[in-house]
Image (cartoon, rainbow, N blue to C red):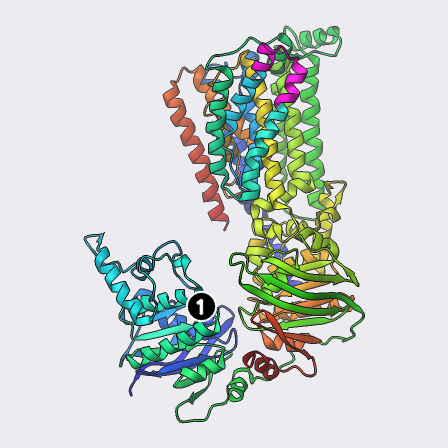
C-alpha cells in the first residue's frame, strides 16, 4: 500500500520553545496509525500542523498527501482534501439537533434555504453507518458522551473523509462505549478510511493499530509495525518515557515531619450529571515538610479532587472527611478552607487564579485582605509593603507592584499566584500544574519555592502531568486513574515506567 | 538583579508618557467637564455659573448622583440595574401616600421608605445572586413591576403637597451657624451682598482636605517609587479641583447657602468613595467584577456580595425617590421615568467598564454632573429636547469609544 500521508522533518518553533524537532510520520492508505506519547510530547502540535491550524510557512519540513506536496492554509483547506480531526473536546452545539450539527457549516441548501428532507435523510444514512440508533432531530444534549463521539464521526463521514484523526477518542468514554468505538474504527478501516488515533490507552492502541509511532519531547522516537512485530506495552512505555532525568530539580533536604493532613473516603459526583461519580474513595495523607505528588493522565480527576477538597469548589454530593492536624476540618466553603489552612494554586491561572486587570499588589492581597487591614479598613502602605516583600522573595520580574498582572509573563504571573497563597499562610498547599506553560528558568525558580515551603514545614500536594517533575520533586506519589487512587509509590520506588504501568494496567 | 534595575531605569524614562497614557481617562473626564462648563458659561453670557443656577444645577442632579453611587457598585460587580427609575418613583409614591393619606410623620415615612427600598433591592438581588438569573432580565422585570406599582399606589393621580418638614429634604438649606456679623464683614470685603459663612468655610475645608489627601497619597507613592504623577500634572489637577470646590461653594454662599441635598450628596459621595477604595468589602467587589471565578477561589463570598450590591442600590434609589418627591412637592406616576438611563450613562461616562471590575465613585459623580451641565446649559440656550437627547446620546457613545480606544492602545 502506498503512503497516503507522509510528514518529513517537521519542525515547529514557538518563541523560546522548540515544540517539534524533525518529526517524521507516515500512514499507509487504509491503515490505522496510533500516535502515542506523554502529555506535552508534541502530538497535538503535530496534528495542528497537519490540519493547517499552523498554516504552511509557519513550520519547517514537508507534508506529502495523496502523492503530492500539500501546503494547507487553514482547517477548511485541509478538510476540503478529506483530512478531518475529531478533537478531545467535542465541538458540537448542544441545543441543535444531530442533523443540524452534522451539516453545520455544510448545510444542504438551495439559495440559502435548507432542504430538511435531504438533510435528515442523509443524517439517517450516516447514523446507520456509525451504528447510532437515534432520530436525526434528537438534540445533542440529550445524548451521552459516547453517542456524541459517534455523531462527530458521522459528521466527519458527511464530508467525504479520507484521513480521519481521532484525538483521545475514548478518554471520556465508558468501557463498553470505548469498545463500540474501536469496533467502528475497524469497520471504517474495512471501508477504506485511513485513520490516526492519538491515545494513552495502550491496550486499545494494540487492538486497532497497524503501526504505532511514539513521540517524545517533540521528536519521533520509534515506529513499530504491529502486524509483523511482537509489541508489548512495556516496549511502548519505555519509548514514551525513556529520557534521562537531568539535574533540573534543585536539591532538597527530605525530612518529613508529623502528619498534617488526612483525607478519608473522599467521593465526588459530577456537578451536572449527578449520577456520574468522578472521585471514588480517595484516601491520602500529607506530612509536614513533605511534597506529595498526584500522577495521572488528563481526565483522571486530579483537578476535580483538588477543587472539591478546596471548599467544595467543584462537584456535588461530596462525602468524606478532611482532617488537619488530627482534627476534622471544616472545608465546606472556600473561605473556611482557607481559614482551616488550605490553599489551592489553580492549573488555570488566567481564568481562575488572577484578576488580570488588577495590579500585582491587589492580586497578592486578595485571599488575605484582613492581613493588610486594620478593622475593615485597608492599609494601602501595608499592602504595598507586603507585595514588595513577595516581589523580592519570589523574584517577580516587574517594574513595580502597581503593574497590572496581565502584562506579566507566565512565570511571573504564576509567582504572583503563589505569593497570594503564601500570604494567606496555609499549612497545606495544593499545587495544580504549578509549572504549566512557563519557561525552564522560571520552572527552576518555582521548584526552589516549593522546596522552601517544605523546609518551612508546610505540606505540599502537587498535581502534575509532567512525570519527570513529579519524580524530581516528590517524596511520595499517588497514582490516579479514572477518579480513584490506583497506587502509591515512594520516591525510591517511583519511575515513569512504574507510574505508567499502574495507569495502563488499571 | 541587574535586569530588574535596568528595567526600572528605562521605565522612569518613559514614565511621563506612560503616566499620561495610563491616566488619560481621568484627566480626560476632568478636562471635558471644564471645557463644557467654560463653553456654556460663555454661550449663556455667564448664566451658567450664577449662584442661583449653580444651586439649581446641584438640586436638579442630586437624585441622579445619589443613584449613580449605587449603580457604580452594581456595575463594578458586573451587573446592571434597570429598575432604579421605577423604584425611585415607587418610593416617592409610597412616601406621598404615607404622609398625605395616612398622616404619618416625616421620620416614620423616611424609615419605612428606606426599608422598602432595601426590600425591593433584596427581592431583585436574590434572583441575580443566588439563582444566577441575568440582572438585565430581573431588573427589566422590576422596572415594569414598580412602574405599575406606583401607578397603582397613586391611582394614576399626582399626590401632594408635602408638609414643609418633608420638603426640606430637597429644598432646605443648612442654617449658617456662624454669627451674622462675620458673614456681613466678609461680604462687604468681597463686594457681595451676603455671604453664608458655613458654605464658604465648607468649600475651604473641602479644598484643604483634597490637598492633604492628595499630598499624603503622593508621598506614599513616592516612598515606593511607583507610578508617581509628574509634579506639573499633580499641581494642576489638585489646583483645579481645590479651586472648583471653593469657587462653587462661594457661589452658593452668596445665594442661600449650603443646600441640604448637597450636604447629603457630599457625605454619601465621601462615604462611598471610602467604602469602595479603602474597605475590605469594597475591594472584594472589584475582584468579583474583575474575575468572579478567581475571586470565589480566593474566598470571596461572591453571591452574598452581589446580593448586597442590589440591596444597597435599592436603599439609594429610595433616598433619591424621597429627594425627588420633596423637590417637586408631589409624587407623580411618571416620576423617575427613564431616569435609570441617565444614571447608567453617568456611570459609564465616569469610566466604569461594562464587563465589571473597573470604575470609581468620583468618576460616576463627575459623569453625572457632566450630563447635568449639558442638560442645564442646553436648556438655558433654549435648545430643544430633541437635540438635547441626541447630543447626550453621542456624548455617552464618545466617552465609551474613548475608553475602548484607550484600552486597546495600552494593550
Image-based side of A23 in relation to A452, left or right? left
Q: Residue furthest left?
A: A110
Bounds of the magenta segment: B96-113
Residue behind mark 1: A88
Is residue B45 one of those drawn in magenta? no
Q: Which residue appears at 46% of the width and 33% of the height?
A: B140
Can residue A384 be seen from the camera position used here? yes
Q: Main secondary structure of the magenta part?
A: helix
Q: Position of residue A240 (x, y in %)?
A: 52, 82
Q: Which residue appears at 31% of the width and 62% of the height?
A: A102
Q: Quadrant of the N terminus of chain A?
A: bottom left
> Taking B319 as reference, is B361 above or below it?
below
Question: What is the secondary structure assignment of the residue under circle 1?
Answer: loop
Can residue B358 be seen from the camera position used here? no
Residue A245 lies in quadrant: bottom right
Q: Tag 1, which chain?
A: A
Q: Quadrant of the C terminus of chain A?
A: bottom right
> Taking B161 as reference, is B402 above or below it?
below
Image-based side of B191 in relation to A178, left or right? right
Q: Position of residue A388 (x, y in %)?
A: 71, 54
Q: Position of residue A71 (x, y in %)?
A: 31, 72
In this rendering, the count of numbered labels is 1
Between A198 and A272, which is closer to the camera in this rendering? A272
> Taking A349 as reference, is A51 above or below it?
below
Amino acid at each position: 500500500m502506498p503512503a497516503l500521508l507522509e510528514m518529513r522533518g517537521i519542525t515547529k518553533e514557538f518563541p523560546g520553545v522548540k515544540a517539534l524537532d524533525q518529526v517524521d510520520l507516515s500512514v499507509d492508505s487504509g491503515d490505522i496509525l496510533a500516535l502515542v506519547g506523554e502529555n506535552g510530547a508534541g502530538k497535538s502540535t503535530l496534528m495542528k500542523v497537519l490540519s493547517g491550524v499552523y498554516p504552511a510557512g509557519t513550520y519547517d519540513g514537508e507534508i506529502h498527501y495523496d502523492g503530492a506536496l500539500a501546503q494547507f492554509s487553514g482547517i477548511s483547506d485541509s478538510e476540503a482534501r478529506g483530512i478531518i480531526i475529531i478533537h478531545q473536546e467535542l465541538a458540537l452545539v448542544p441545543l441543535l439537533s444531530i442533523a443540524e450539527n452534522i451539516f453545520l457549516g455544510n448545510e444542504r441548501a438551495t439559495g440559502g434555504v435548507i432542504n430538511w428532507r435531504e438533510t435528515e435523510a442523509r443524517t439517517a444514512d450516516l447514523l446507520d453507518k456509525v451504528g447510532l440508533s437515534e432520530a436525526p432531530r434528537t438534540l445533542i444534549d440529550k445524548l451521552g458522551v459516547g453517542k456524541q463521539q459517534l455523531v462527530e464521526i458521522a459528521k466527519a463521514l458527511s464530508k467525504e473523509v479520507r484521513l480521519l484523526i481521532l484525538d483521545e477518542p475514548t478518554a471520556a468514554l465508558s468501557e463498553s462505549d470505548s469498545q463500540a468505538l474501536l469496533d467502528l474504527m475497524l469497520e471504517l478501516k474495512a471501508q477504506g478510511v485511513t485513520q490516526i488515533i492519538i491515545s494513552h490507552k495502550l491496550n486499545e492502541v494494540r487492538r486497532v493499530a497497524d503501526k504505532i509511532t511514539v513521540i517524545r519531547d517533540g521528536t519521533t522516537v520509534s515506529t513499530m509495525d504491529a502486524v509483523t512485530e511482537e509489541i508489548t506495552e512495556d516496549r511502548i512505555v519505555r519509548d514514551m518515557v525513556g529520557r534521562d532525568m537531568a539535574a533540573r530539580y534543585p536539591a532538597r533536604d527530605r525530612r518529613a515531619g508529623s502528619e498534617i493532613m488526612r483525607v478519608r473516603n473522599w467521593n465526588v459526583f459530577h456537578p451536572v450529571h449527578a449520577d456520574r461519580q468522578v472521585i471514588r474513595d480517595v484516601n491520602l495523607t500529607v506530612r509536614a515538610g513533605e511534597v506529595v505528588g498526584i500522577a495521572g493522565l488528563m481526565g483522571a480527576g486530579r483537578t476535580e479532587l483538588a477543587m472539591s477538597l478546596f471548599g467544595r469548589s467543584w462537584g456535588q454530593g461530596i462525602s468524606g472527611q478532611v482532617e488537619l492536624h488530627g482534627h476534622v476540618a471544616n472545608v465546606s466553603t472556600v473561605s473556611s478552607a482557607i481559614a482551616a489552612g488550605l490553599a489551592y494554586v489553580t492549573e488555570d491561572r488566567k481564568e481562575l487564579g488572577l484578576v488580570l486587570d488588577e495590579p500585582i499588589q491587589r492580586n497578592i492581597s486578595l485571599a488575605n485582605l484582613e492581613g493588610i487591614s486594620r478593622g475593615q479598613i485597608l492599609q494601602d502602605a501595608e499592602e504595598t509593603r507586603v507585595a514588595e516583600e513577595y516581589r523580592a522573595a519570589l523574584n517577580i520580574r516587574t517594574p513595580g507592584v502597581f503593574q497590572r498582572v496581565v502584562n506579566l509573563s507566565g512565570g511571573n504571573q504564576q509567582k504572583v499566584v503563589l505569593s497570594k497563597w503564601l500570604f494567606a499562610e496555609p499549612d497545606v498547599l495544593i499545587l495544580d500544574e504549578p509549572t504549566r506553560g512557563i519557561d525552564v528558568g522560571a520552572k527552576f525558580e518555582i521548584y526552589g519555592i516549593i522546596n522552601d515551603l517544605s523546609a518551612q514545614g508546610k505540606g505540599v500536594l502537587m498535581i502534575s502531568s509532567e512525570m519527570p517533575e513529579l519524580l524530581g520533586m516528590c517524596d511520595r506519589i499517588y497514582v490516579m486513574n479514572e477518579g480513584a487512587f490506583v497506587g502509591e509509590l515512594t520516591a525510591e520506588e517511583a519511575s515513569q515506567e512504574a507510574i505508567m504501568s499502574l495507569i495502563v494496567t488499571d | 538583579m541587574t535586569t530588574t534595575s535596568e528595567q526600572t531605569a528605562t521605565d522612569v524614562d518613559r514614565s511621563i508618557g506612560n503616566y499620561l497614557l495610563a491616566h488619560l481617562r481621568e484627566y480626560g473626564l476632568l478636562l471635558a467637564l471644564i471645557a463644557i462648563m467654560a463653553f456654556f458659561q460663555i454661550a449663556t453670557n455667564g448664566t451658567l455659573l450664577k449662584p442661583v443656577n449653580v444651586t439649581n444645577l446641584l438640586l436638579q442632579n442630586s437624585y441622579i448622583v445619589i443613584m449613580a453611587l449605587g449603580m457604580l457598585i452594581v456595575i463594578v460587580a458586573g451587573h446592571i440595574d434597570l429598575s432604579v427609575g421605577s423604584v425611585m418613583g415607587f418610593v416617592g409614591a409610597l412616601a406621598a401616600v404615607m404622609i398625605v393619606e395616612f398622616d404619618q410623620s416625616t421620620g416614620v415615612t423616611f424609615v419605612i421608605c428606606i426599608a422598602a427600598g432595601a426590600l425591593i433591592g433584596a427581592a431583585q438581588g436574590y434572583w441575580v445572586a443566588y439563582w444566577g438569573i441575568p440582572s438585565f432580565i430581573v431588573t427589566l422585570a422590576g422596572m415594569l413591576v414598580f412602574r405599575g406599582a406606583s401607578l397603582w399606589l397613586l391611582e394614576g393621580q399626582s399626590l401632594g403637597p408635602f408638609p414643609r418638614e418633608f420638603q426640606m429634604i430637597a429644598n432646605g438649606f443648612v442654617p449658617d451657624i456662624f454669627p451674622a456679623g462675620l458673614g456681613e464683614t466678609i461680604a462687604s470685603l468681597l463686594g457681595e451682598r451676603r455671604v453664608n459663612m458655613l458654605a464658604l468655610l465648607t468649600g475651604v475645608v473641602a479644598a484643604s482636605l483634597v490637598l492633604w489627601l492628595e499630598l499624603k497619597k503622593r508621598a506614599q507613592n513616592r516612598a515606593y517609587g511607583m507610578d508617581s504623577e509628574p509634579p506639573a500634572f499633580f499641581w494642576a489637577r489638585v489646583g483645579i479641583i481645590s479651586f472648583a470646590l471653593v469657587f462653587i461653594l462661594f457661589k452658593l454662599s452668596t445665594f442661600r447657602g449650603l443646600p441640604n441635598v448637597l450636604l447629603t450628596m457630599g457625605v454619601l459621595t465621601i462615604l462611598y468613595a471610602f467604602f469602595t477604595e479603602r474597605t475590605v468589602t469594597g475591594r472584594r467587589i472589584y475582584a468579583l467584577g474583575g474575575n468572579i471565578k478567581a475571586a470565589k477561589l480566593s474566598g470571596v463570598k461572591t453571591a452574598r456580595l452581589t446580593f448586597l450590591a442590589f440591596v444597597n442600590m435599592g436603599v439609594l434609589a429610595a433616598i433619591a425617590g424621597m429627594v425627588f418627591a420633596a423637590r417637586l412637592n408631589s409624587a407623580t406616576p411618571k416620576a423617575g421615568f427613564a431616569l435609570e438611563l441617565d444614571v447608567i450613562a453617568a456611570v459609564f461616562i465616569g469610566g466604569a467598564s461594562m464587563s465589571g471590575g473597573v470604575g470609581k465613585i468620583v468618576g460616576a459623580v463627575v459623569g453625572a454632573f457632566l450630563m447635568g451641565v449639558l442638560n442645564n446649559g442646553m436648556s438655558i440656550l433654549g435648545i430643544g429636547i430633541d437635540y438635547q437627547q441626541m447630543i447626550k446620546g453621542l456624548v455617552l457613545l464618545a466617552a465609551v469609544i474613548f475608553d475602548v480606544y484607550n484600552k486597546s492602545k495600552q494593550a
